[in-house]
Image (spheres, grey):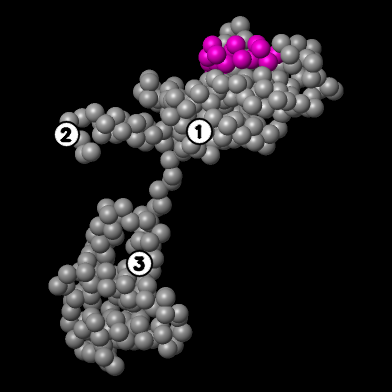
Amino acid sequence: MSHQNAHSEITRDGCDEHFADNACINDYLEVLRSQRQLSPHSISAYQLDLQELQQLAGKQGLVSLETKHIRRFTSQLHARELNPRSIARKLSSWRGYYHWLMEQHGLASNPVEGIRAPKKNKPLPKALGADDAVRLVSQASSDQATPLANRAMFELLYSSGLRVSELIGLDIQFIHEGNYSSAGWVDLEEAEVHVTGKGNKPRIVPVGGPAIQALREWIAIRGSLLKADPHPLFLTGRGTRMSARLVQLRIKAHAQSLDIPANVHPHMLRHSFASHVLQSSGDLRAVQEMLGHSSIAATQVYTSLDFQHLAKVYDATHPRAKK
């Protein structure tokens, strides 16, 4: 857009025919104050956003900016690790200003139109460190109701990366007429767990030795708690099938009793399983299969966790790393 054709219509107030940036911005802020009756706080935010646009533009006048300039400024803000929500707000402020210049002063086009802020980064799933994860699942639970059930559940969650819904759906072995449970079961002899995940997708995941031992110890006393339904692998103190909410409460209380500095929940053990297996093996496809993800993209988030681990090792050990 040329400077000459950008202001072909009449001008008014302080935003003179030369489109002096400060004068135009002051006029715009006055419109927000008097006509739109925005709060002083909102007007101050608009002013800061427009001043930042001036800083990014440098000596270039705001009316001579083109879409390519705004796109570059957006990338610069993103490179500074500014929150995508904050970038979106700035773009909104700039877009509103140029829209006003078009309506009131005949600006030819709005250079911010069609530009969007970068997508908000999804937070990485929180995973326990390997030492904390092992301490959590290996130490006896303080729950007096069914401590052996707790130990077996926690070991199995971390050992095989199960979802809590998959864990509580496990049956002891078979249902009627020798058919395997449709929900899932643990094969102690083969050291594997059979589960049906999202989308009724079945999978088989290995079970580690400590989890198998914990399961054997729990199953040895499980019969004393049985009530009406003989099938659930994990039972509450009342003999009913374990609920997801009760697993959440028990694992959180157990973590707090061990002073583990995290708000631990069952899914955190799934994240920890994935992260720790990936760190050790580097086999993303195997982790995808064990988690039951239909797409490798869903599993790739754990590569970020793995890189965090590598970065910590690098920073702690490399002589040229930033301390």
Which segment is the magenta one? 202-219
Question: Residue at (56%, 21%) from the top-left corner?
Answer: 139
Look at the image and tell me in which quarter the C terminus lies.
top left
Q: Nearer the viewer, mark 3 or mark 1?
A: 1
- Expressed as whole percent of the image width and height from the top left, the position of residue 2 reads 18, 76
The answer to if 216 sits in the magenta stretch is yes
Task: Please tell me which of labels 3 and 2 falls first in the chain.
Answer: 3
Residue 245 drawn at (x, y percent): 67, 37
Residue type at mark 3?
Lys
Mark 2 Cα within 10 Å, few/some/many (few <14, many 20+)?
Answer: few
What residue sits 26% from the left and 31% below the top? 316
Q: Earlier in the sequence, mark 1 or mark 2?
A: 1
The earlier-in-sequence mark between 3 and 1 is 3
Q: Residue at 39% of width from left, 52% of height from top?
A: 119
Discs 3, 2 touching: Cβ within 8 Å: no
Please give the residue where the numbered disc 1 appears in the rendered image. Answer: 260
Q: How far across and how far down the image is residue 17, in percent?
A: 21, 89
Compute the Cα span from label 3 to label 1: 40 Å
Q: Are marks 1 and 2 in contact (CB under 8 Å)?
A: no
Q: Nearer the viewer, residue 145 or 287?
A: 145
Query: In the rendered view, does 297 fall on the left or right side of 144?
Result: left
The foreground one among 88 and 255 is 255
The answer to whether residue 218 is above or below residue 125 is above
Q: Quadrant of residue 124?
A: top left
- Farthest residue, direction left: 59
Q: Amino acid at mark 2?
A: Arg
Alpha-carbon span between mark 1 and mark 2: 32 Å
Which residue bears the numbered disc 2? 320
Q: Give the residue number, with chain letter if any, for mark 3.
A: 90
Name, please, the residue furthest toward the right: 228
